[in-house]
Image: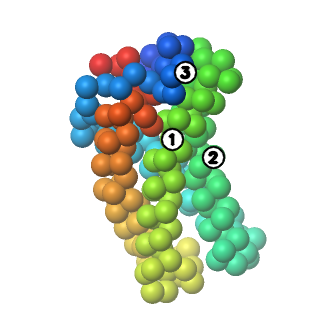
Amino acid sequence: MDHIAHHAEAAHDHSMYHGGGAPAPAGASWATAAKATLHCLTGCAIGEILGMLIGTALAWNNVQTMILAIALAFLFGYSFTLHAARRAGLNWASAIKVALAADTVSIAVMELVDNGIIALVPGAMDAQLSDGLFWSSLLGGFVIAFLLTTPVNKWMIGRGKGHAVVHAHHH
């Protein structure tokens, strides 16, 4: 069983869904927070890049392309956790709760930071997919988003929120 499926299986303890979330762990390690952030970053990166490719292929404007990229980032971020939760035996309703609880804040922070950086880098919004500026600002945005989202995830996991819903019984 893979790492995420193991966490989702642990999250199947229905006591987590009563009283507003997972039991608060004693604290969250930086490694746990980094893994949770990397999980979200993977979904965000796939969704954003796919959104940029589709938007460019359809000759959409920057706003339309960014909206699609953000929507796909959330979709892929949620789908990774949802898939693992379903594979671990959770029913659809429980799996959706786990995905929403585990990923919403993390993906939102990551998307805000990443897209904010792209919007602030001069020329990045108008760069083509073949331009180094496009890729350097996108990848640089992902790195900065990872660095800023990891402490958010550490704080949330330490309070029994976010990825703690998935990690609650792992340790």
* Quarter of the figure that contains the C terminus: top left
Q: Which element carries disc 3, helix, strand or loop? A: helix
Q: Which element carries disc 2, helix, strand or loop? A: helix
Which tag is nearer the camera, tag 1 or tag 3?
3
Instruction: Inspect this view and state whether residue 115 appears.
Output: yes
Question: In the rendered structure, which amino acid carries the disc numbered 3?
Answer: Tyr
When asked about the image quadrant of residue 81, the answer is top right
> Image point 56% across, 34% down: which residue?
99
Question: Sequence order check: which comes first, mark 1 or mark 3?
Answer: 3
When asked about the image quadrant of residue 70, the answer is bottom right
Dot 3: few (<14), some (14–19), or many (≥20) neighbours within 10 Å?
A: some
The residue where tag 1 is placed is 103
Do the numbered discs 2 and 3 sit on residues whose CB atoms are within 8 Å?
Answer: no
Dot 2: few (<14), some (14–19), or many (≥20) neighbours within 10 Å?
A: some
Question: Against 83, is 64 above or below?
Answer: below
The residue where tag 2 is placed is 75
Q: Nearer the viewer, residue 34 or 58?
A: 34
Mark 1–mark 2 Cα distance, whole angstroms, equals: 10 Å
Q: Residue 18 in the image: x percent, y percent?
A: 54, 19
* Quarter of the figure that contains the N terminus: top left
Q: Which of 74 and 53 is in front in this view?
A: 74
The residue where tag 3 is placed is 17
Most extreme residue toward the front is: 19
Question: Sequence order check: which comes first, mark 2 or mark 3?
Answer: 3
Which tag is nearer the camera, tag 1 or tag 2?
1
